[in-house]
Amino acid sequence: MKLSSRFTAAYADRFTLLKAPAVDAPPAQRDPEVIETVSRMLSDIERDGLDAVRRYARTLDGQPDGAIELDTADLARSGDRLPKDLRAAIELGAERTRRFAGLQREHLADFEEEIAPGLLVGQRYIPVAAVGAYLPAGRFPLTASAFMTVGVAKAAGVPTVIGCTPPQPDGRANDAVTYAAHLSGIDHLFVVGGVQALAAMAFGLLGRAPVDMLVGAGNAYVAEAKRQLFGTVAIDLLAGPSEVAVIADGTADAEAVAADLLGQAEHGPNSPAALVTTSEQLGRAVIAAVERQVPTLSTRDICGPAWHDFGSVILVDTREDAVAVMDELAPEHLEVHTAEDDWYHDTLRNYGSLFLGHWSTVAYSDKGMAGTNHTLPTAGGAKHSAGLSVSRYLKPLTYQRISREATPLLAEAVEVISASEGMTAHQATATLRLRSYAG
């Protein structure tokens, strides 16, 4: 999430940096060591199969030999081991995400239309057959990840969804992640982490056929494995460090804006956070509020460096300039705290997901409570791509049914075009049908 040099040159007189990032580089550059390691691991696993998966599981995760799949009873019992308030929150998040995904599916309608006499065309939405979901459970287990990947896939009608989650230090799966997967409708869950998990699902090494699609967040190794496996399988998207940006004017609450910036900076020390404001007073108040809040946080060793190295505050003169800057940043998460939220909603074009008004915060979506998906494009990807949704699991398959009476118009035109291209076999398919029509 960075302004391009071309944009900066063109708009230099339209914004001022009140706080610039300390690191003048993209926050997520591909590490050659990561690329090489992942490539070697994938080759080993493709060659040696499940033996290599288990070998890496022992070496990297300290996972003992034994069964790696959790049975249905294990999945269901995981909720019994959770505090009641956590269990209730997970149940709420699963229901909200499933409800929003259901609404998305309802609005993706099959259709059929006769666009010319005898020429019937249509489209059907068919779900992919099998999805593999990676459910992270490292320092910060992403409990809601199952809602966004497994639950949405099931809402799309995917028949088979399997998942992998890394073991905890005791060798067991994280109960909150497991219960979220259970509520989301997962068919099979395996306690396997990292690159070996993605490879096992893609190559069909877990007693199931290879999946058609891999989804879910993870560390740099997981992201690189998805990149290298793309083509063998489909993927949701290639996401980098989590990002947040805020547009705020003089009516915004500086403490709330600062808290929301730090809320996403907490994801990692290379997570960018940006404020674009039309008020210098508000901008400086937010900078001061961030400095006050960071020392109070248990994760100050993460969000502090993230703000210092990749945080920015940009002052602009007008709301139009704010939109121009923000559409160039194209952030993963975008909050709007202004007296003109509706205008910004109507005008902004590039973002992963939008959060309007003081009472909206990215954390509500992150944890699944808002229902919208938190798997979103980063690093400017929102300029051309959207986040994970029901539609990503569906193939819009077209079809056509052509009657005898439609043949002359279609076939004669195809004969002409095919002849001009020199594609005589194409031409012959049309000519044959013209003869049949005449006969």
Image (cartoon, helix red, strand yellow):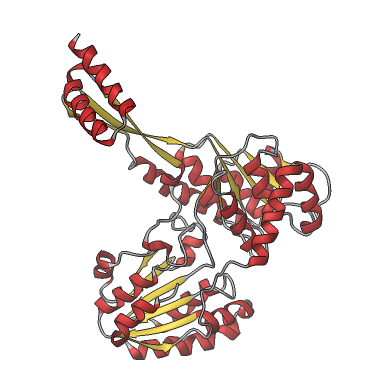
Q: Quadrant of the C terminus?
A: top left
Q: Residue at x 30, y 74 (%)?
A: 324
**Relative depth, front residue between 203 and 177:** 203
Residue 312, image x, y percentages: 45, 82
Q: In this view, which residue lies farthest toward the top?
A: 439
Query: Residue 256 is drawn in which quadrant?
Result: bottom left
Residue 5, image x, y percentages: 39, 79
Tell me if 298 is positioned left or right of 331 in this view: right
Above or below residue 121? Residue 145 is: below
Query: Residue 411 is drawn in which quadrant?
Result: top left
Tell me if 188 is positioned left or right of 294 in this view: right
Tell me if 19 is positioned left or right of 342 in this view: right
Q: In this view, which residue lies farthest toward the front?
A: 422
Q: How many marks?
A: 0
Residue 334, image x, y percentages: 39, 69
Residue 335, image x, y percentages: 39, 70
Regarding residue 352, the answer to whether it shows in the image is no
Q: Which residue is drawn at 57% across and 43% down?
A: 232
Regarding residue 334, the answer to whether it shows in the image is yes
Q: Quadrant of the N terminus?
A: bottom left
**Relative depth, front residue between 340 and 206:** 206
Above or below residue 278? Residue 225 is: above
Q: Which residue is drawn at 49% across and 55% down?
A: 237
Q: Residue at x 77, y 57 (%)?
A: 61
